[in-house]
Amino acid sequence: MAVAFDGQAVFQALFNVVSEVIEKNSMFKSQLVDIKSALDCLEPLIEVIPEYGKELDRQEEELQKFTIQMKEGIQLIHKCSKVHAWNAYKRHKYANELVELDKSLQRLMDILKVLGIRDAKKTLATVKNIETRFQQIDEKFVVQNIPSKKIEAWSAVPELPPLTVGLEGPLKELKLMLLKDGLSMLVLTAPGGCGKTTLATKFCQDAEVRDKFKNNIFFVTVSKKPNLNLIVQELCQRKGSQVPDFQTDVSAVDWLQEFVKQTDPLLLVLDDIWSESESLLEKLDELKIANHKILGTSRFVFPRFCPPYYLESLNEKDATALFYHSASLGDRSSHVPEDLSRKIVEHCKGFPLAITVIGRSLCGQPLEIWQKRVIEWTKGSSILDSDHHLLACLQSSLDALEKENSVIKECFMDLGSFPEDQRISATILIDIWSVLYKIEEDMLCIGNVEELNNRSLATLVVTRKDNKEVDGYYAEHFVTQHDILRELAIYQASLGSIEQRKRVIIDICGDNLPEWWIKQKYQPISARLVSISTDGDFSATWPNMELPQAEVLILNFQSKKYALPEFLEKVDKLKVLIITNYGVLPAQINNFPLLRSLSNLKRIRLERISIPSISKDPVQLDNLENISLFMCNVSKAFSNCSSQLVDLLPNVVEINIDYCNDLVELPAMLCDLIPLKKLSITNSHKLSALPEEIGKLVNLEVLRVRSCTDLSVLPDSIRHLKMLSFLDISDCYSMKELPEHIGEMCSLETLNMRQCSRLQELPESVLDLEQLEDVICDEETEILWKPFLPILQNIHIRVVKEDINLNWLHKFPS
């Protein structure tokens, strides 16, 4: 009985319209060429579908779905042929839909290939045709060094591209990690297009690896939803075994386990693993047989099963070599100035896929085309506009993320709001996300950063590895992002009209304001987040901008003096204001009193700013709750102040002062802020005293004076802080003694006193700290507690060794 499949006519219509549009329209050519290749492979298979009879009975419903998808595909391609070049939104939308159409065609090929496996003798000629077509597809993508559309099938180790660069060091490290005893699985992690598959291929073809595994090396490209039965059936066929028809995953796992036992040693490479494949890794991890190794490549990390190996971007030398090869310069390089090639390589940011596709797009082009490309990028055009392969490769990570967690995708997009090549403090993200996404717990915000880190969409750097406090202190957490991923975030944010975007990101070079801003006729912009960055050459007058819905405003600049945009006083709903000077020295803000109009402002963060005296131009902010000052000059802010600070800031509950090196003594007037619950003063090395008035902060729950190396004592009035549950005096090397009556702090639960090496003894009143549970210290300060431990039996002494990560320091201006 022949299976009912009425898709032949629809397939032919789709084939014809794709061929026609390829000839007439170049806008979507790369996607259409991929679809045409898939259709070429499918054509002989579609013709013989009726001959398969019962083999496809269970697939009949799925095949009918493909018929509907092909009909929709015909309509989509007709729409693509009518899109204007200036319509960025539709170009992006239809490009994604074409990628999905291509994926559906690949899935149809997968079904038909399984059919060929089940009855290999009967359909031998067709199976050979399928294998030939699949080999052509794999070879096409290997040569281009571009990840294929990831067919759900096992295959032999692919060939390496003609040129590989920058992989000798990673290959050596990979061999040291995976070939050692005790490690059975490792995942090679990086964003899409970084060369993970190429490195895995190089690993498989390495002479030492081949000798160790006696050529028992199997290489499979995993889909987003892997089919374990299909994987095992393919493996059976590869080994020449009789192919069983597994009814359940359990029987497939049983067969796989027996096969692994008989194939010793074994290297299994799983290429392009997605988060949906975790169950597959779990099944494979359960095998844990000696001499059995699994190497995965993924944009994700899977800490449950194995450590990740992070593949870094190419250095300048290797990036240049790959670009010259991709652009086929060779001996003809003289027609392209070296400086021009260097600028193009710089824009590719060491990203192998970007280098390859840009190089190929410029191959053989006139010099004027090369120059035009650089000029467009300099003026703000995205490198992602240069080739849809690059955009589609990166976009697929966001598409998957949106399906799983749309909020985390929005968090990724927010990272584009910060200047290129700069670290982003995690506390800034907490400020932003607490307002935009109503995330009340700081640790949940950090969880979102961890999620982006696990998906290779950002990198989380913790500068102090021992930072395990439970009070939500994340000032030592920083986020970095590859520049190409930043461009992806900005590209996504730029889709749609200016007036309707969720976020508006403006990067101004010199006085070159965006044309839409200059010509706008005061039309309101509905964005909730607005980021404006200027360089040291900016001197223009701010044009007006209406932001009736803006809740977050980020101002980035590089100059000694800065004027806040005057439109700021009309941003009525603003809740978060972040002002960052990326220059070397703290800058002056000329019109600071503009802030007094921000009646709804809840959080403000200032970086490298000279805070003006509040007595000169008092700024009253009734709803302000959180103040963060980083590398600011604060000594003039409270000098000769006649105003009552509590009248200006009546509802502040948290103050963070970090790296403010001109702070010698904490101003007593800060102690009038009775609602204050958290006070953190860190890395302020000249701070030598806290005021006796600190005892007035009766609502204080957290007091941190970490790394204030000149601070020698705490005021005795600290005894009045009855609500204080967390006290951090770590790295206060000059601290000689604790207050005699510290035992009166009846709510103290956690005390961090690590690296307080000058402390000689503890006051006897520590015996009265009935709520104290956790003491964080080093080996020296641990000794001070031993005489008290027989009485304080509920205390847990946590000895922590110093582990500081300084790799992030190059991100700061010198």
Image (cartoon, grey):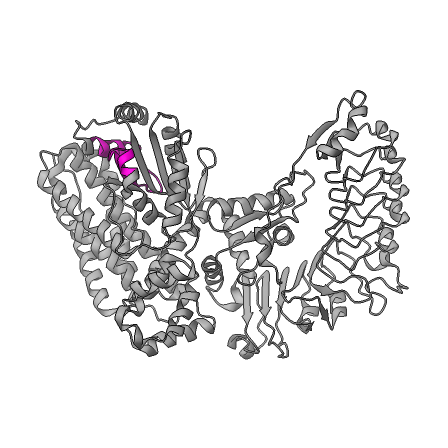
Q: Can residue 101 be seen?
A: yes
**Which of 558/318 is in front?**
318
* Left or right of residue 11, residue 538 in this image: right
The stretch of residues the image draws in magenta is 209-236
Taking 473 as reference, is 379 above or below it?
Answer: below
* Left or right of residue 88, residue 425 in this image: right
* Residue at 39% over, 72% down: 86
* Left or right of residue 555, residue 69 in this image: left
Residue 422 placed where, x, y %?
56, 59
Image quarter hosting the N terminus: top left
Residue 660 placed where, x, y %?
74, 57
* Residue at 41% over, 67% down: 88
Taking 365 as reference, is 425 above or below it?
Answer: above
Residue 269 placed where, x, y %?
32, 38
Taking 118 as reference, is 652 above or below it?
Answer: below
Q: Can residue 274 be seen?
A: no
Q: How many marks?
A: 0
> Is residue 223 part of the magenta span, yes or no?
yes
* Residue at 21% over, 37% down: 114
* Left or right of residue 378, residue 23 in this image: left
> Is residue 486 part of the magenta span, yes or no?
no
* Residue at 31% over, 35% down: 268
Residue 627 placed where, x, y %?
74, 55
The picture quadrant where one finds residue 203 is: top left
The picture quadrant where one finds residue 374 is: bottom left
The picture quadrant where one finds residue 336 is: bottom left
Image quarter hosting the C terminus: bottom right
**Which of 269/211 is in front?**
211
